[in-house]
Image (spheres, grey):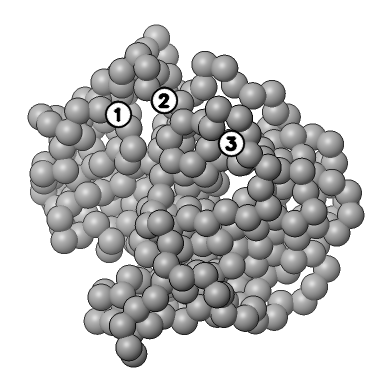
């Protein structure tokens, strides 16, 4: 995690392919600074962000700060910039003094390569701090992504159909992990900042039996927290922010699939394997399966029924929201 100091954050991001631990095993993927996701960048309204992007890939790339209220011209958030293989570029972003606090993210935006480079691991979180933060015991930044790896740990190339309909990976990851362990104690309130960095996957997020509020979607906060037990998010949606206080008992966290629709034989499947989670004293452990995450305490994995939801509002959102 990198924080601004005195109104300035200077960062070097190196985009490269390498061996990174994904879902508990070595995989050949892309990453910023040899990590997946890349480092979280934390700013304040009015800050200046300077990023030197170094391209160690074999193809061109660039950088987009998704959702930030900055100039799209020059060496700021200009998606027409092309940083060729072996070259570097110095980005300079100036956030306005009244920039909305919230959760944002960065990723490549080079025409023709966006989905592939994100799917292979190029993404990271940006937090614009709230001048009036809510009182919580703990804050978590959860970056949700998906990927498909072969037996040797190589990223599987997309089929023609998935290129047309949108690629959904076989593994759904939370901060690069497929078996995340989080601990929470009843009565403590946590804030979860969630980013869906999936290239095409929509998620239906649900938390049962818990005291949870939705604080905001995309940038900024709602005027008042909204009590919720379900929310939906599409691929590459900037963020959802939740506040939750665990309640003792048998709660369940679920991320159900969403039927995105489609044409004829290209209609994607709306089924999802399950993931079970079990309380272990002060925490829980999730065991991953493919295509989506579904958390249900003290149940063995099973396949869930197809979702009845159609479409979505079109941006990614993350994972098993809630709790803590």
Look at the picture and state if 23 lies above or below 134: below
Residue at image point 61% right, 30% down: 224
Within 10 angstroms of label 2, few (less than 14), some, or many (20 or more) residues?
A: some
Secondary element under disc 1, as helix, strand or loop, is loop
Secondary element under disc 2, as helix, strand or loop, is loop
Q: Name the side, left or right, on which 118 lies relative to 305.
A: left
Front residue of 79/19: it is 79
Look at the picture and state if 30 lies above or below 151: above
Q: Which mark is residue 100?
A: 2
Circles 1 and 2, Cβ within 8 Å, touching? The answer is yes
Q: Name the side, left or right, on which 243 lies relative to 315.
A: right
CA–CA distance between discs 1 and 2? 8 Å
Q: Which mark is residue 250?
A: none
CA–CA distance between discs 3 and 2? 13 Å
Residue at image point 85% right, 59% down: 250
Q: Circle 1 is placed at which residue position?
A: 69
Asked if one can make out residue 140 in the rendered structure from this viewpoint, the answer is: no
Image location (x, y in percent) of residue 185: 83, 41
Q: Which mark is residue 215?
A: 3
Look at the picture and state if 39 lies above or below 182: above
Image location (x, y in percent) of residue 172: 52, 65
Image location (x, y in percent) of residue 54: 22, 41
Asked if one can make out residue 223 in the rendered structure from this viewpoint, the answer is: yes
Residue at image point 26% right, 20% down: 94
CA–CA distance between discs 3 and 1? 20 Å
Q: Name the side, left or right, on which 163 lies relative to 132.
A: left
Image location (x, y in percent) of residue 249: 89, 54
Of callouts 1 and 2, which one flags the residue occurring earlier in the amino acid sequence?
Answer: 1
Q: Quadrant of the C terminus?
A: top right
Residue at image point 28% right, 61% down: 115
Of callouts 3 and 1, which one flags the residue occurring earlier in the amino acid sequence?
Answer: 1
């Amino acid at each position: 995690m990198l924080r601004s100091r005195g109104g300035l954050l200077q960062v070097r991001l190196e985009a490269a392919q390498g061996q990174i631990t994904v879902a508990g095993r070595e995989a050949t993927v892309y990453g910023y600074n040899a990590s997946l996701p890349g480092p979280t960048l934390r700013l304040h309204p009015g800050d200046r962000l300077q990023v030197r992007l170094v391209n160690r890939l074999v193809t061109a790339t660039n950088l987009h700060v998704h959702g930030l209220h900055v100039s799209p011209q020059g060496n700021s958030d200009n998606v027409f910039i092309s940083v060729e293989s072996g070259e570097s570029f110095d980005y300079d972003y100036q956030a306005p003094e009244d920039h909305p606090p919230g959760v944002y993210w960065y990723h490549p935006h080079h025409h023709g390569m966006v989905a592939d480079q994100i799917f292979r691991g190029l993404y990271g979180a940006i937090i614009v701090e709230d001048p009036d933060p809510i009182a919580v015991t703990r804050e978590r930044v959860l970056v949700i992504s998906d990927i498909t790896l072969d037996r040797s740990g190589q990223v599987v190339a997309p089929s023609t159909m998935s290129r047309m309909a949108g690629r959904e990976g076989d593994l759904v990851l939370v901060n690069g992990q497929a078996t995340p362990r989080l601990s929470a104690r009843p009565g403590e309130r946590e804030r979860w900042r969630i980013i869906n960095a999936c290239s095409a996957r929509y998620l239906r997020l649900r938390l049962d039996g818990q005291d949870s509020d939705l604080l905001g979607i995309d940038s900024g906060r709602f005027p008042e927290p909204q009590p919720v037990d379900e929310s939906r998010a599409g691929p590459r949606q900037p963020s959802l922010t939740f506040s939750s206080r665990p309640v003792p008992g048998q709660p369940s966290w679920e991320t159900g699939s969403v039927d995105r629709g489609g044409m004829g034989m290209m209609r994607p499947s709306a089924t999802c394997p399950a993931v079970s989670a079990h309380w272990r004293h002060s925490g829980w452990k999730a065991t991953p399966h493919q295509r989506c995450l579904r958390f249900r305490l003290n149940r063995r994995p099973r396949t869930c029924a197809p979702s009845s939801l159609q479409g979505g509002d079109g941006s990614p959102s993350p994972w098993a929201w809630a709790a803590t």
